[in-house]
Amino acid sequence: MTQFDKIHTVEQNFSKSNPKHLKSMFGATDLMPLWVADMDFEIAKPIQEALQKLVIRNMYAYEFNTDEVFKAISDWNLKRHKLHLHPKLFVQVPSVLTGIGVLIRELSEKGDGILVQTPVYHQFFKVIESAERKVIHNKLKMVNGLYFMDFEDIERKFKTLNIKAVLLCNPHNPVGRVWSKDELQTLIDLANKYNITVISDEIHSEIVYSNSQFISMASLNKSENHITILGSPAKTFGMQSIANGYLYIADSEILNRVKHTVESLYLGHGSIYSANATIAAYTKGEEWLDALLVYLEKSMQWIENFIQNELPEVVFYKPEGTYQVWLDFTKLNLSDAALKHLVVMQAKLALAPGDWFESTHTQFMRMNIASPLSKIQQAFYQLKKAIEAGVDSTFIEEEIK
Ligand SMILES: Cc1ncc(COP(=O)(O)O)c(C=O)c1O
């Protein structure tokens, strides 16, 4: 039994298990909530201690610790990834999505295009559209069970559409690819050729499994290119509701503009909870993270074996990174509504529907597996039972009417 096997009560206040959210998203409340990309694990002890120290103090005078946060992130990257990030090139923002929203506004005008590689994290659409920019879809290609970037389509779109930035997701949510050095370099070279900026969302960068290696955009040859990196300890350390995000911008002109905007909107302070938790995570959280990765990889292995042996009608794209599992139900040959009914009403699972990530992916669902394995196993047993039983006859009759 490891620390990650412990079952915690999932608070009803958490977004994923809030009955109001479940009802409005899925039409039912008695569901196992595996749709949000957060964790059911207790955070690392050093982070708990850092937060508790603040709580028992009972005093909250103005206190900011941004420089120490940037130093902690920079030292972590040097130690863990041999990546040199200069503490002076960071900008703190309340969240990664805030950072993307700021960057999009700095790098483009209303009506300009921002390219995303779909299926992709659905909030990317909202952050682009709400800034009145256009989402340009560049669909990932599937070859032998693995997703790849479609560079021909990218170049065609760079050439013919008014695109100002690419919003890259690395590792990719939801398909779980950890982009290779060659893929990233080809993307940068194309972006350079057409003078387009790469915004690299690397929030999932630490959740990478043993046969893959995460390469940050910041480590590549980028002489002519504007590259901006976004990160956060949120996914790595299970700090989803308390983490800030950060931007890392090597181009001094973009850095100054972004800093000015962030400062003028007073977005850069963060709270002392977030700051001290982040420092504790990056200076004392490594052992916990290594244990987490071993645990998640074992869970992934269990899922692969179970699907192979017990659920061959479901296609599983084993992720290279992230704790998201991308499941393809096409072989069940069900209508979109019948599939949702089977998974939600019969298997009692709240999974993120594939069409959130690309409208054509109605036969896919994303499952978050950062939960005790016994819970994930239970989810798959429920799924198997529902698939074996088939879609409820009453539902089919309703559908035919
Ligand atoms: C790729 C990606 N970027 C950003 C976020 C959200 O980050 P934040 O809460 O810091 O805005 C998520 C959350 O799932 C994500 O998957």
Image (cartoon, helix red, strand yellow):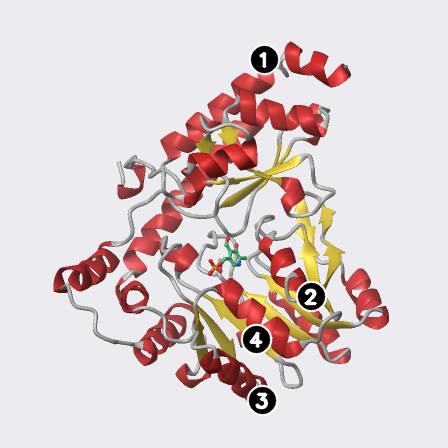
Gap between marks 3 and 2 measured at Cα: 24 Å
Q: Which residue is mark 3?
A: 253
52 sits to left or right of 122: left
- Residue depicted at 35% across the width and 49% down the height: 292
Question: Measuring 81% from the left and 62% from the top, which residue is drawn there?
Answer: 152
Mark 3, mark 2: which one is toward the viewer?
2
Decide: few, some or many residues near mark 1? Use Cα within 10 Å; few <14, some 14-19, many ≥20. Answer: few
Circles 4 and 3, Cβ within 8 Å, touching? The answer is: no
| Precedes in sequence: disc 4 or disc 3 | 4
Identify residue for label 2.
132
**Any atom of ligand 1 within 8 Å of the CB at mark 4?**
no
Q: Does dot 4 land on a helix, a strand or a loop?
A: strand
Name the residue that disc number 1 marks.
Answer: 389
Amino acid type at circle 2 is: Glu
- Who comes first in sequence, dot 1 or dot 3? 3
Residue located beneath label 4 in the image:
228
Q: Position of residue 17 (x, y in %)?
A: 42, 37
Q: Quadrant of the C terminus?
A: top right
Q: Nearer the viewer, mark 4 or mark 3?
A: 3
The amino acid on which the numbered mark 3 sits, given as a three-letter code, is: Glu
Decide which of 94, 321 is in the foreground and name it: 94
